[in-house]
Amino acid sequence: MPLPSLPFTARGILPCAPELVYRALSDYDAWQEWMPSLASSRLLTREDILAIVELRTGGKAAEALMMECIQTPQRAVLARVIEGSTSIREMQWDIEPADPGFARVSVTVKRRINLHLLNPAQWLVLSPAKCLASLQSWVAAEHPGPEAVSDGENLFELWETEAGMVCWVRGRKYKLTPAEDGQA
């Protein structure tokens, strides 16, 4: 008898159009850029609203996972594991419009209770809150909001990350460290 699946959900409002969120979710080759703990993501085949995707998590025992992704255009993406050893059964992303220029997004991860939960690399992928926060950061970085100038050049960006403050000046990354009192 298989163990039951436990659903975990996170919800949030992203400062972008719902179409942009849907484009990010249906660009499976780019999942590795924002999904926590993914070492690679690759679209294997796509036909209409169905896609088969290969994912690899980071870590020493990184095994490939095959997922079928069923899309409801502009509204949802359901990703179900069809091959591979993981505690994730499925991941459901739902998108709906909020106020103009905003998207209400929820992500639900259904997972089995098994020994894979002991692997710390999988906890980030399994955390809907971390996945939603990562998607929000990626969307904000890839598609700046309406304050972006279309005919100019971005010279400076400042981000607060888990590793501290980081800035980019003309494409070069700098890590900011606090100055001691009285020193500049």
Image: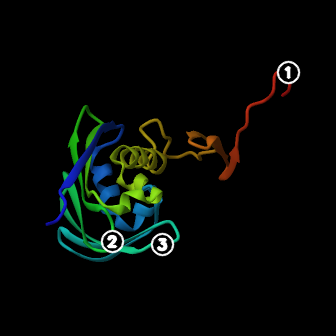
Query: How far from the left and from the top, in percent, is residue 65?
Result: 34, 72
Name the amino acid, label 1.
Answer: Gly
Kindly indicate whether the residue at mark 2 contacts the one at mark 1 (C-beta within 8 angstroms).
no
Which of the two residues, 163 or 97, is positioned nearer the viewer here?
A: 163
Which of the two residues, 165 or 86, is positioned nearer the viewer here?
A: 86
Q: Which is more N-terminal, label 1 or label 3? A: 3
Query: How far from the left and from the top, in percent, is residue 31?
Result: 40, 61
Check disc 3 and report its element: helix, strand or loop. loop
Report which residue position mark 3 lands on.
61
Q: CA distance from mark 3 to mark 1?
A: 49 Å
**From this viewpoint, which residue is outermost toward the top?**
182
Q: Quadrant of residue 46?
A: bottom left
**From this viewpoint, which residue is outermost toward the right?**
183
Q: Which is more N-terminal, label 2 or label 1? A: 2
Check disc 1 and report its element: helix, strand or loop. loop
**From this viewpoint, which residue is outermost toward the left?**
1
In percent of the image, x 44 and y 55: which residue is there?
Answer: 36
Q: 10 Å neighbourhood of mark 2: few (<14), some, or many (≥20)? A: few
Q: Which is more N-terminal, label 3 or label 2? A: 3
- Is 64 on the left or on the right of 6, as rendered? right
Query: How far from the left and from the top, in percent, is residue 115?
Result: 36, 62
Which of the two residues, 38 or 32, is positioned nearer the viewer here?
A: 38
Report which residue position mark 2 lands on.
85
Q: CA distance from mark 2 to mark 3?
A: 11 Å
Name the amino acid, label 2.
Answer: Ser
Q: CA distance from mark 1 to mark 2?
A: 55 Å
Report which residue position mark 1 lands on.
182
Check disc 2 and report its element: helix, strand or loop. loop
For the N terminus, the image quarter is bottom left
Q: Is residue 179 above or below residue 150?
A: above
